[in-house]
Image (cartoon, helix red, strand yellow):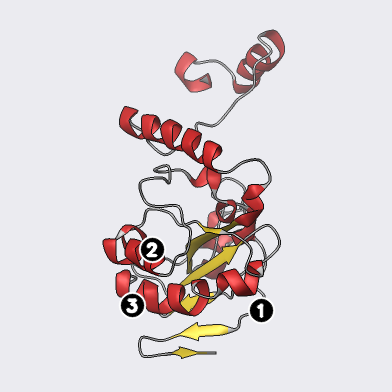
Amino acid sequence: MSREFCVNHETMRKLVVEDLGMKSYKRKNVHHLNDSIRRKRLERCIQLKARFAPGTEDQILFSDEKLFTVEEASNRQNDRILASRSQDIPDSIKYIDRVQKPLSLMVWAGVSADSRTNLIFVPQGVKINSQTYRELVLEPEIASAGEKLFQSHPWTYQQDSALAHASKVSQSWFREQNIDFISKDEWPPSSPDLNPLDYSVWAGPVRNLTRVWSPSKLVC
């Protein structure tokens, strides 16, 4: 603004902050939602609210995957280097290396109000489709979750609408196993707000790493 109006920076700051009483806010990136998605989110949220009475949310096993990349994290706004000249900064500090395809690790987890599944790690390069999802997650973890995590009490499995989750093969598996679940037509589209794993769960430390999966077999 100072450059645009050819006004001294400090003068502009006083005009904005002291005279006008305004603050500077950054624009934020948000997920684009068209009218169809907004309508479906509202309709399905209302249906889920009606389906699960207050208190029954403790019976839901929430699940999600997270892709971790082996790259240095940085904050372009707050990560700063103090130096007299740019030339004095060593390259090892000045630059953050980035590669086109960094090493990564896909992790799956399930949590409820008072329990959690094993963490499952997917080797790099393994594509999660209906078959690997069943072999990796559903059969070793979810088939016995009712007995192990909920002591045979009623419970419901939640998953988002990823292709491997929403496929006919995966949806049919739950019905064959008589496991109550939130189907692909019930879960609100583009809605991380309803899944606690999208918040503090993934931000916490990784503990109890008890299961590693390979395309041929599970190794406990």
- For this orientation, the residue located farthest to the left is 168
Q: Is residue 65 left or right of residue 125?
A: right
Query: Vertically, is 16 above or below 202?
Result: above
Q: Closer to the camera, 220 or 66?
A: 220
Q: Which residue is mark 3?
A: 125
Of pointers 3 and 1, the one earlier in the residue sequence = 3
Give the percent coordinates (x, y) of residue 65. Answer: 47, 64
Q: Which residue is mark 2?
A: 175
Of pointers 1 and 2, the one earlier in the residue sequence = 2
Q: Crowdedness of circle 2 by 10 Å Cα count: few (<14), some, many (20+)?
A: few
Residue type at mark 2? Arg
Query: Vertically, is 123 above or below 61?
Result: below
Residue type at mark 3? Gly
* Number of numbered discs: 3
Residue depicted at x 35% and y 46%: 185
Q: SS at mark 3?
A: loop
Q: Crowdedness of circle 3 by 10 Å Cα count: few (<14), some, many (20+)?
A: few
The numbered disc on residue 208 is: 1
Q: Is residue 176 left or right of residue 58?
A: left
Of pointers 3 and 2, the one earlier in the residue sequence = 3
Give the percent coordinates (x, y) of residue 13. Answer: 64, 19
Q: CA distance from mark 3 to mark 1?
A: 24 Å
From the image, which quarter does the C terminus lie in? bottom right
Q: CA distance from mark 3 to mark 2?
A: 30 Å
CB-based contact (under 8 Å), mark 3 and mark 1: no
Q: Crowdedness of circle 1 by 10 Å Cα count: few (<14), some, many (20+)?
A: few
Q: SS at mark 2?
A: helix
Q: Could you tell me if residue 219 is visible in this image?
A: yes
The mark lying in front, picked from 1 and 2, is: 2
Give the percent coordinates (x, y) of residue 108. Answer: 50, 69
Q: CA distance from mark 1 to mark 2?
A: 30 Å
